[in-house]
Amino acid sequence: MRPMLFSTVFFAAVTMAVSPLATHVAFGQTAYPTKNIRVIVPSPTGGPSDIVARLLGDKLTQSLGKQVVVDNRTGASQIIGSHIVAKAEPDGYTLLQAAANMSINPIMVPDLPFDPVKDFAPVSMTHITPYVFAVSGQSSIRSVQDLLKFIRSNPGKITYGVTGPGSPHQLATLTMMQIAGGLTGMTEVQYKGSTPAHPDLIANRITFMIDPLAAASPHIRAGLLRALAVSTPQRNPSFPDVPSAAEAGLPGYDFASWGGIFAPAGTPRAVVLKLNAEIGAALAMPDIRKRFGDMGLVTKHSTPEAFGQFLISEIARWRALLAKKP
């Protein structure tokens, strides 16, 4: 009788201890979110990350029943905004709409105040961002071959826009220089984002910029900018008359950025999975796919695990490219 009594008492004690915890966990999983969610965008308004965050934020507000607020925190090649999220409470209420800088900064910035792999919980990719070779609509340059010839003929007079050291803009230009060869005497002009660069590009105060298609497309459609080529191997469905860079005279050129949602490391798995599912559902909506396509973006949903592995592979990719930098 005593062993049975011990077993009964032990089982009852364990049940009493575990049940509140199980109830709490279950409650936490079903209750999220109980307050508004903030999505930090570490780049200016009007760029791809900002537009994507706002489009998805509207959908998530509807599906989650709480307001999703976009908060632009710019500066330092997106480090400032990313650092805010890295140090935020890991409860699912502060998220990051990240871009390719997440994989570039650990190579370019020796004193980076966070580890992109260890300090964040990947939630899902959101999109792929093709880039476009763009010049002013006033420019005499009408093709990539014209651009290359103009650069070679005017050493010391060429300027191009980037959004900081190690930015995708800079790496896209570096890739062009490596493939074309012999491109010297160019001056890099740094901006805090695509939007602040556009007035100078439109006015022909800088020679060219390899810019996200999503950011440049409104100006291209308005005739203020001229698209010379897209950066991907295939033409973009939204701009079928614009050749790929390879078609336009840069064989092997293949460049695209990306975007995705991260939470702080330690965010509960159940919260990450819920966000992942809601993001996937939003990205599958026809109106979202059309809006992304109209901007030249390609929707991309992924598992948290696949996104994490993608980030690691991108860091390795950029490290290899930058090792060849002249």
Image (tube, rainbow, N blue to C red):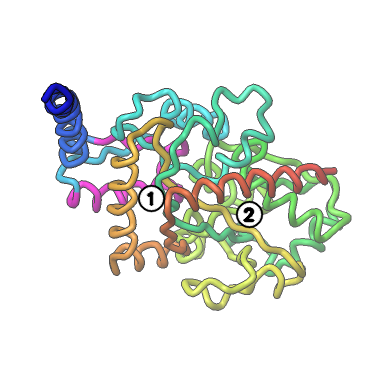
Location of residue 222 in the rendering, given as x and y in whole percent from the top left corner: 45, 64
Q: Is residue 42 magenta?
A: yes
Location of residue 33 in the rendering, given as x and y in whole percent from the top left corner: 20, 38
Residue at far front of view: 1
Does residue 160 appear left or right of residue 267 in this picture? Answer: right
Disc 1 on helix, strand or loop? helix
Location of residue 88 in the rendering, given as x and y in whole percent from the top left corner: 38, 25
Does residue 323 appear left or right of residue 52 in this picture? Answer: right
Q: Nearer the viewer, residue 65 or 1?
A: 1
* Above-or-below relation of 282 to 104: below
Looking at the picture, which amino acid does disc 2 mark?
Ile
Name the residue: 66% across, 53% down.
208
Q: Quadrant of residue 21?
A: top left
Quarter of the image where the N terminus is located = top left
Marker disc for residue 210: 2
Q: Which residue is under mark 1?
A: 51
Please report contact status of discs 1 and 2: CB closer than 8 Å, yes or no: no
Q: Quadrant of residue 291?
A: bottom left
Disc 2 on helix, strand or loop? strand
Does residue 277 appear left or right of residue 258 in this picture? Answer: left
Q: Is residue 43 magenta?
A: yes
Range covered by the magenta-colored residues: 37-63
Name the residue: 75% across, 57% down.
176
Looking at the picture, which amino acid does disc 1 mark?
Ile
Q: Label 1: few (<14), some or many (≥20) within 10 Å?
A: many
